[in-house]
Image: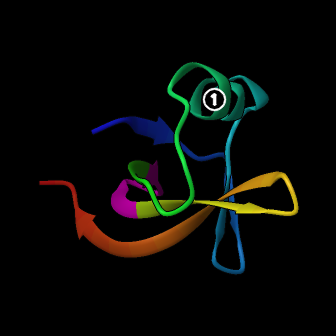
Amino acid sequence: MQQYFAKDKINNSFVLDEQDLFHIEKVMRMKDNDVVYVVYNEIIHEAFVKFNKGKLSIEAGRETAIN
């Protein structure tokens, strides 16, 4: 499972670095609804890759606290 670090969270979407978004889309070739882990505010979130009209976003799912 791929893990990324978010810079911010707006509504239900994580803001990742452009390099990470490139990696998700072009290198890993992830598809709609693929699962990744995103760390934001010391919490690991299960998140989902979403493509809407060709634009990539990472939507938040359930969260798990880091011990």
Residue visible at 57% across and 19% down in the picture: 27
* Residue 14 relative to residue 66: left or right: right
Q: For the residue labelled by badge 1, is the local secondary structure a helix, a strand or a loop? A: helix
Residue type at mark 1 is: Asp
Q: Quadrant of the N terminus?
A: top left
Q: Nearer the viewer, residue 7 or 46?
A: 46
Q: Where's residue 6, x and y in %?
A: 59, 47
Residue 60 among magenta residues: no
Task: Give the image's coloring scheme.
Answer: rainbow
Q: Quadrant of the C terminus?
A: bottom left
For the record, the magenta segment spans 39-46
* Residue 18 relative to residue 64: left or right: right
Query: Counting other residues with Cα less than 10 Å from the Cα at mark 1, is it few (<14), some (14-19), or many (20 or more)?
Result: some
Q: Where's residue 58, x and y in %?
A: 61, 58
Residue visible at 44% across and 50% down in the picture: 38
* Residue 56 relative to residue 24: left or right: right
Query: Is the stretch drawn in magenta largely helix, strand or loop?
Result: strand
Quarter of the rendering containing residue 65: bottom left
* Residue 11 relative to residue 29: left or right: right
Quick check: 24 above or below 40? Answer: above
**How many numbered marks have been drawn onto this rendered protein structure?**
1
Quarter of the rendering containing residue 53: bottom right
Quick check: 8 above or below 5? Answer: below
Q: Where's residue 9, x and y in %?
A: 66, 65
Q: Which residue is mark 1?
A: 20
Quarter of the rendering containing residue 8: bottom right
Residue visible at 54% across and 49% down in the picture: 31
Residue 42 among magenta residues: yes
Residue visible at 43% across and 54% down in the picture: 34
Q: Where's residue 41, x and y in %?
A: 47, 57
